[in-house]
Each structure stands twice: as structure tokens, then as C-alpha cells.
Image (cartoon, rainbow, N blue to C red):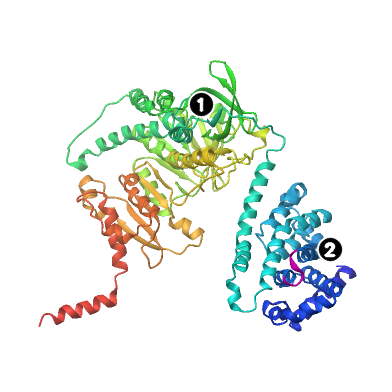
Amino acid sequence: MNAQRLLLIAALLGLISSYFAFDLGHFLSLDYFKSRQAAIETWRSAQPMTATLIYFAAYVVVTALSLPGAAVMTLVGGAVFGLLWGLLLVSFASSLGATLAFLASRFLLREWVQQHFGDRLHAINAGVEKEGGFYLFTLRLVPAFPFFVINLLMGLTPIRTLTFYWVSQIGMLAGTLAYVYAGTQLAKIDSLSGILSPALLGSFALLGVFPLLAKKVVGLVAAKKVYVGWQKPARFERNLIVIGGGSAGLVTAYIAAAVKASVTLIEKHKLGGDCLNTGCIPSKALIRSAKLLSHIQRAPEFGIREARAEFDFAEVMQRVQQVITTVAPHDSAERYTGLGVEVIAGAATLVSPWEVDIVHNNGERQQLSARSIVIATGARPFVPPIPGIEAVGYFTSDTVWELRELPRRLVVLGGGPIGSELTQAFARFGAKVTQVEMAPRLLMREDPEVSDLVMQRFRDEGIEVLVEHQATRFIIEDGEKILIADHQGQDVRIPFDALLVAVGRLANLQGYGLEALGINASRTLATNEFLQTSFPNIYAAGDVAGPFQFTHTAAHQAWYAAVNALFDPWKKFRTDYSVIPWATFIEPEVAHVGLNELEAQERNIPYEVTRYDISDLDRAIADGEAHGFIKVLTVPGKDKILGVTLVGEHAGELIAEYVLAMRHGIGLNKILGTIHIYPTLAEANKYVAGNWKKAHAPQQLLAWVKRFHAWRLY
């Protein structure tokens, strides 16, 4: 560090130390000002120029040194110099002092900070170079951080000094006006009773309301800023255009039609999305047939000496298609047209923030405009670029329904919910299934004990579960397909006949014109809490928006997207993700809502655990399904539910009681006090609440009650 920097540091430290050593801060208090108000005003009247210069210089010094007291000095400026002169003095003094603090920070620290943290600050530097003035203006208008912090931090960025000065001058003007006006009213009170004057109360109310108003103004300015360069249509042809006919798109269109908006729904493939056609519905139909086979194989457990089943896998897959056909009318174009939705079969491309180019499946072309657009284009299976994978061929959750012959040896790549559901189903039909997962266990979003229970059940059913195995390449030797997987540094060879890839899903982002509009789309569409993209009138919902890829969360988001798109700016709602349930439909079935232990520990949230083993439940014993457990996390010492993990028969149904409880603030005490039919699986929910109650029984009170009953024996 050179001599100039050392000298400046010494000077600054000396000035700041003097401020505290001589208790100069007491001069910058309202009490001191009110006690000396008459003398100060007399002096200012006698020597107006001297008073003005001293006040201006003192304000610059306080601001430049980032000392406490600037707010009080602003009030004093209004009280002593009046609204107009006070505003001028404070505005220029605060901007000049802020710029001096900015320059000091830049001179002393910027070079060192950029040398040591330049790589990490690259994105910030780029943003400041491009939009630094607007960022600073927003911070000045809506003080998210104390002004002295802004001064010092901005000095570390590449923003130009002149830009910093004039943006600060303009950005702080409105807030300064509010404070100076409050000071003019403060000067008029002579006693505590004066605090109740309407003018003073109004001025302080203005100080409280101003940041809210400023935030609204900044939001409007930012919203208009993104549309620069785009020509807005003079009149819109629709209130809403929805791109994508899956769960999110269908629900969005339904809600829009229900409130009598003009809405067009565009889908280039099949309505219903992957849930109806390749996901939830077909997989559950397949799982149901597989479960029936597993029960027949368990016949001796139910006192039936022998039972067997003959089946043709092609007929099973045909039943899956019949189920899809039966459900399809719920999501059909005819139904939605009847509800008032214009349904177009075709491909949509955004050509402006309000306009969509549509190529109909019959080749016709048209362009539509709408005040708002909702993107609900869903997701597709991700296929990792593993060497040789194209040569051996593979199925995904989209294409596995084309199978009509059961594979003899099936490798399932992936240990998440989709991979696990299909693994167990195919194994129950008689395929030799090997499930390969690179993580240490299956179902990594669940607690380890859940994964252990599931893996043990899979192995008991003859499934080969290989965790900590990373697929490195596929080869074909002598006509046989082989997966080479790395396990702790050793190559493991896994021969197979068919490969199912289930390692995750990618949002459908390409081909919709998002890049041309500059909408932020990497893994998913970036949205704010209202599901708005970088263009406030363009929303996203469902898998394409994340963070959850469930049909029920897509429908949940769709409500917010539809209502916000149709009623903004008058009313809009923040998307609520506080209570999100999900289930994995294997045996044992796994359901989850809120926090589990893994998540609570990662987030350092204190909790208590209450557990009930379903092996003790009468109905589960009678049904031959006496396995699994309920684990409830609660606030320590209270019955407020933080989360529930439920493993066992019909877990996805039983979890609903806890979803309702968490959504509406119902604790375990009220669940315990609710009658549950005997004998049902739902009684387990009551029993776990009873276990919580036992653990929190008032022992001291019970000891006195015991004495009371003993006394009554006489």
C-alpha cells in the first residue's frame, strides 16, 4: 500500500476517532437541537451565509465519513432553513458527501478487492457496467441498505463517478424532500403535545409510506424499461394466450375462461401433456397391473393355498392405452372449447412480448396478440451423453409405452421416483431388472431410512439395486449390450437387453422464441414470486418454471399465473410453496409433505420427531400390509407440524390429512381429537398424534392427579 493511501487512512481514522472521543454525536440529536433551537435560529438570522456554509460543510463531512446523524441533520435542515433552502442544501451536501465516501472507498479498496475477488465479482461488474445507474437509482429511491453502505460498496464497482453523483442527486431527492418537510413540522412543536399535530403526524406518515410508494414507482419504471424497442399493439385480440396444453396450461386456460376472459390455448402435440399421455396416468395403470400380479404371488399369506395368473405383456400395455383413452376426454379440445377456450393445434413462437406466431398442424399460419401470455411448455426426459448410448438404444418415460414385449433383462438408469416406480413394475412382470444409481442410495430427496426400507424391499423382490455405480459407457460385444459402470474405481459389467433412462427431466425451452426476446431461460424459465418472466406480462407455470415437477404443483402454479396475468396491476398474488406434498407410487408407497429430517438439518431448523410404526396398526395387520411408518416433525415443545414422511400402503392418500393440517395451521392435538373410523389405515394418523401427546404429557400435573385419586379411596 503506497504512502498516499496510508496518509488518507490515517486522516480518516483520526477524524472518526475524534468524533467518538469528543462525543460529537450528542450535537446530532433531536434533543440537543430542541434545547438550542431558539439560539440556533437567532444565529442563523444574524449570520445567514455563515450558518449556511457551516451547515453545508458539516453535512458533507458527516456523510463523507459515514458517521451516524445524517437523518437528524436532514430534519434540522428543514427546521432551520425551511423547505426550499433545506432541500437544496441537504440534496447537494448529501450527494457531495456520498461521492467523497465513494471516492475514498474506490481509492483505498477497489484495487485490492478486484485483485482478490475479481472472478467472483465478474457478473456483478458486468451488470454494473450495463445497468449500474438504474441499480443505484433503485437503491437510492428504495433504501434497501443504509446509504453509507451503498456509497462504500459502489466505490468497489466500475460505475463512473459522474454517474454515481448525478444518479445519487436525483435518486435521493424524493426521500430528502420527505425528511426536510418532516423537519419543518418538527420545528413548530414546543412541547410533547405538539407531537400530535396533524401536520407532524402527516409528515412522519409520509416517511413511512414513501419507501412503499417509491418501490411501486421503481417497479413500474423497471417494467416499462424492458419493453424499450418493442411496439405494443394498439388493441389486443385476446386477454390471454397459453402456450402448452399440459396440466399447467389446461388449468390456466380453464381459470381464464371461468372468469370470462378471452383465452387461446395452443398445443402442438396432445392435450393433457406428459401426465396423461406418457407420465402419471400410464405409469399408474401399469403399476396397478403389476401390483395385482404381486398379490397373486403372495396368495399363501392370505390363506389361499395356490393362485396363479397368466398374462400377455402386450395386453397389459394395451390396457394402459385404454386407460389413457378413458381419461383423455377430461383434457380434450371439445371439453375446453365448450368451456369457452379457443383451442389451437399447432406450434407457437413468440415474436414480441404480446404477439405469437402460430403454425397450425394443418399448415395454416396466423398471428395473435394478447395482453398477457403464459408459457406452460412442460419438460421432457433428459438423456445423458454417455458414450455408446445411441448405439445400444434406449427407452425413456416418454417412449417405454411403445413396448409390447417384456424385456428379459432390463437396466434402469436412475434411482429417483420415475426410475423406482418403473423398476418395481417391470420386475413384477418377470423382467430381471438392474437399477443403477450413481448416488449412495435411491430416492435421495427422502430420509436415509426411507431409502434403506425401499432398497431392501426391492432386493427382496429380486431386483438388483446398484448404488454408487456411475454409468461410464455402453458397448456391444458379440451382439450383447453391456453397460460399463464405475463403482469405487472398478469397472462393473452389466449385460442387458433393454435400457430405460430415468435420470431427470429438462424444461422445454427451445423453439418458442424465448431467445429472440432475451427471456432468461437456462435450466428453467426464470420467474419472480408472481411467476412473471423478465417481461411482466409473460408468465410461466408448470415444469418449465420449476422448482417442482409435479402435476399437482403445475396446477397450483397455474392458478397464480392465470389470476396474476388477468388482473395485474390491480391485484396479484405471490405463489405459495409452503405446503407441497408428493408421493412415489412404489411398494412401500412413500409420501412426503413439508420438511423431512434431512431438509431440517440442512437448513438448521430445530425440530422434534414423533413416530408411529404401521406394523402395530390393526387394519394394516388384517390387510397383510403391516409395514412402514409415519414420522412427524414438529416445533420443539409444540404440536405445530413442520413436515411428515409417510411410508406404507396408500401413503399418498393418508398424507392428505397432514397437507390440510399444515395448510390451515391445525396441530397434532386437533388430529388426536378427531374421530377416525375403525379399522382403517387412517387411524395411524391419530395414533402418531397420540404418541406426541404421550411424550408431552404434563408429568407434574399427573403426579398431583395420582395423589387426588389415592385420597378419594378413603
CA–CA distance in space, label 2 to label 1: 58 Å
Instruction: Say few, some or many: other residues with alpha carbon within 10 Å of mark 1 (under 14 / 14 to 19 / 20 or more).
Output: many
Residue with the mark numbered 1 = 267
Query: Hey, what amino acid is under mark 1?
Result: Glu
Helix, strand or loop for the magenta stretch, by majority? helix
The label number, if any, that marks residue 107 in the structure image: 2
**Residue at the (58%, 23%) spot, across then down:** 358
Query: Where 643 sits versus 359, above or below?
Result: below
The label number, if any, that marks residue 569 in the structure image: none
Circle 1 SS class: strand
| Quadrant for the C terminus in the image | bottom left
Query: Hey, what amino acid is under mark 2?
Result: Phe
Image location of residue 303, percent across then percent down: 17, 41
Query: Where 491 sits versus 596, above or below?
Result: above
Give, as a single range, the part of the protein colored magenta.
Answer: 79-83
Where is residue 82, by image quadrant?
bottom right
State left or right for residue 413 relative to residue 359: left
| Quadrant for the N terminus in the image | bottom right
